[in-house]
Amino acid sequence: MENMVISLNAVLPLFLIIALGCAAKQLHILSDDAARQANGLCFKLFMAPLLFYNVYSTDLASAYSWKLLVFCVVGTLAEFAFGLLFIPHIEPSRPAQGVMLQAFCRPNIVLLGLPLSTALFGPENIGHIAFMLAVLVPLINILAVLALELFRGGTPNPKRILLGVAKNPFVLGAVAGFLCKLLQIQLPYVLDSVISSMAEAATPLALVLMGTSMNFGKLQGCGRSLTVCTVVRLFAAPVVFLSLAVALGFRGVPLCGVMLVFATPVAVNSYTMALQMDGDADLAGGIVLLTTGLSCLTLFLWIFLLKALGLF
């Protein structure tokens, strides 16, 4: 019973905040245009402080885990390679193929992963995950662009891809945090207070806005492709990679890091990117909606199982 309560306490608050966003949209508290503008504000202004402060407030000398980093990088590349070979056999549409490949390897690790790990282990104990994110977030963004570019029929532009990654607020925040730690830069109290306040506001704001982006109409007509992506993202990948991680001796926070990379739903901004890069935006929106909704149950079950087995 204690493990069930801990699991519920970690997962339920996050999804209740998302539900508030859904309710705000249904009650017309926030228009679609206002929600889009707020999403842009949140992404460009609040995400960098969130990543910065997670790295800056971590004792990196004792937090980094090369084993976790290598496992998650290799696993993410394996997901991408598997999708590249498998997806064309089940989906004839090239715009849909790119969206599916993106879904295979683009977890919502920042918006759901960070708060979930904080709820389970406390902000002072998730340095392993913050370190991993600083490397994994740029890689995931590169793979997402490659996925859509390859199936759009164009030739991937390395300069454009690298520029897009370099301008990503997640990447900028994490790199700035690392530089401050490595150079032992002590922020003035006022600046520290501003950044920490913005970091605290980032997660609830992002989760509410995630709720406003939920459009149930996007579930219609997606069929088999939607089902395949959901099964891979929430069931198949977690079974494979969590089993491997346990066999390799991962426990506690590092094992939680593996769960967050391979068992969280598809990132919300995958829909926006599909829209901008000629992907099947309706399929992308349906994947985000269904994986996010079902992950309330699946994440609870994964956490409960790992707690019950004494692995967390």
Image (cartoon, helix red, strand yellow):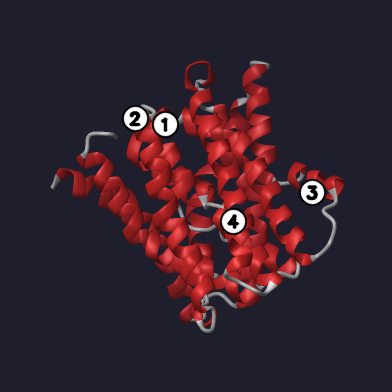
- Residue 251: which disc? 2
Please tell me which of labels 2 and 4 falls first in the chain: 4
Say few, some or many: other residues with alpha carbon within 10 Å of mark 4 (under 14 / 14 to 19 / 20 or more).
many
| Residue carrying label 3 | 161
| Distance (Cα) linking label 1 and label 3 | 29 Å
On the image, the x and y values in percent for residue 302 come to 31, 49
Question: Residue at (46%, 72%) from the top-left corner?
Answer: 22
Task: Please tell me whether mark 2 sits on a helix, a strand or a loop.
Answer: loop
| Residue carrying label 1 | 254
Q: Amino acid at mark 4?
A: Gly
| Distance (Cα) linking label 4 and label 3 | 20 Å
Tell me if label 1 and label 2 are in contact, CB under 8 Å.
yes
Tell me if label 4 and label 3 are in contact, CB under 8 Å.
no
Q: Splitting the image into 4 quarters, where does residue 169 fall?
A: top right
Q: Nearer the viewer, residue 106 or 236?
A: 236
On the image, the x and y values in percent for residue 10 come to 32, 48
| Distance (Cα) linking label 2 and label 3 | 35 Å
Please tell me which of labels 2 and 3 falls first in the chain: 3
Say few, some or many: other residues with alpha carbon within 10 Å of mark 1 (under 14 / 14 to 19 / 20 or more).
many
Q: Nearer the viewer, mark 4 or mark 1?
A: 4
Q: Quadrant of the C terminus?
A: top left
Is 191 drawn above or below residue 18 in the view shown? above
Q: Amino acid at mark 2?
A: Arg
| Distance (Cα) linking label 1 and label 2 | 6 Å
Question: Residue at (52%, 52%) from the top-left corner?
Answer: 108
**Residue at the extreme left:** 1
| Residue carrying label 4 | 83
Tell me if label 2 and label 4 are in contact, CB under 8 Å.
no
Say few, some or many: other residues with alpha carbon within 10 Å of mark 3 (under 14 / 14 to 19 / 20 or more).
some
Tell me if label 4 and label 1 are in contact, CB under 8 Å.
no
Q: Amino acid at mark 1?
A: Pro
